[in-house]
Amino acid sequence: MAQDAITAVINSADVQGKYLDNSALEKLKGYFATGELRVRAASTISANAAAIVKEAVAKSLLYSDITRPGGNMYTTRRYAACIRDLDYYLRYATYAMLAGDPSILDERVLNGLKETYNSLGVPVGATVQAIQAIKEVTASLVGSDAGKEMGVYLDYISSGLS
Ligand SMILES: CCC1=C(C)/C(=C/C2=NC(=C\c3[nH]c(/C=C4\NC(=O)[C@H](C)[C@H]4CC)c(C)c3CCC(=O)O)/C(CCC(=O)O)=C2C)NC1=O
């Protein structure tokens, strides 16, 4: 089950039959203190999602062998599939950033993804480059604090794919 920063600390206290200890409370404090920042970043990202992906693709994949005949992004269908995948990564990273917890990424994005990519010949290295470009473009849009938060979850997807 996908969880968030709150249910994560509650579940781990409950397993021990205890109230939240100091380190759990500190974690929650940090989460609540950055709540406004997370919500604002999510709103900016959702208003600019298509532009973020477009710029990230321009920075990382366009004009490379991947978009030429023989490349995995060649043909309109495969190009569109790639853009759609990057849209998924940005949207789910935004959910995880709001939740302050990566479990939704394991559950809804990474589950079986590497196997799918390998069987279709989708290059993982190039995908990770595009995700890293999304990270840069997003940070330049939402500022470095929120950008760092988003970076945690975009990196989580990158390492889950690698
Ligand atoms: C929300 C969870 C979710 C994810 C993550 C997801 C990914 C996903 N990407 C796919 C394909 C694909 N993914 C890509 C992506 C790329 N090719 C490249 O060269 C680039 C480096 C890269 C983009 C960055 C391409 C081109 C295909 C189509 C491959 C093919 O059919 O030949 C497929 C196979 C089925 C399909 O074509 O739709 C899945 C399941 N689907 C989901 O439901």
Image (spheres, rainbow, N blue to C red):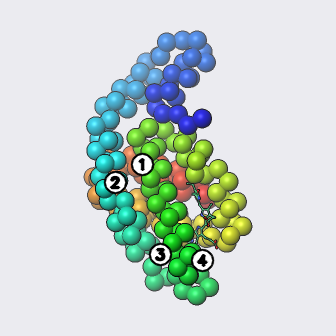
Q: Which residue in the structure is indicated by mark 2?
A: 45
Mark 3 belongs to which amino acid? Leu
The relative height of residue 61 versus residue 20 in the rendered view (above or below) is below
Q: Is mark 3 within 8 Å of ligand 1?
A: yes
Q: Is residue 52 visible in this depiction of the protein?
A: yes
Q: Is mark 4 within 8 Å of ligand 1?
A: yes
Mark 2 belongs to which amino acid? Ile
Q: Position of residue 30 (x, y in %)?
A: 36, 31
Q: Earlier in the sequence, mark 2 or mark 1?
A: 2
Q: Is residue 45 left or right of residue 78?
A: left
Q: Is residue 65 left or right of residue 39?
A: right
Figure quadrant, ligand 1: bottom right
- Disc 4 and disc 3: Cα gap in Å? 11 Å
Mark 1 belongs to which amino acid? Thr
Q: Which residue in the structure is indicated by mark 3?
A: 61
Q: Earlier in the sequence, mark 4 or mark 3?
A: 3
Quick check: marks 2 and 1 in contact, CB under 8 Å? Answer: yes
The quarter holding residue 23 reads top left
Q: Residue at x 31, y 56 (%)?
A: 47
Mark 4 belongs to which amino acid? Asn
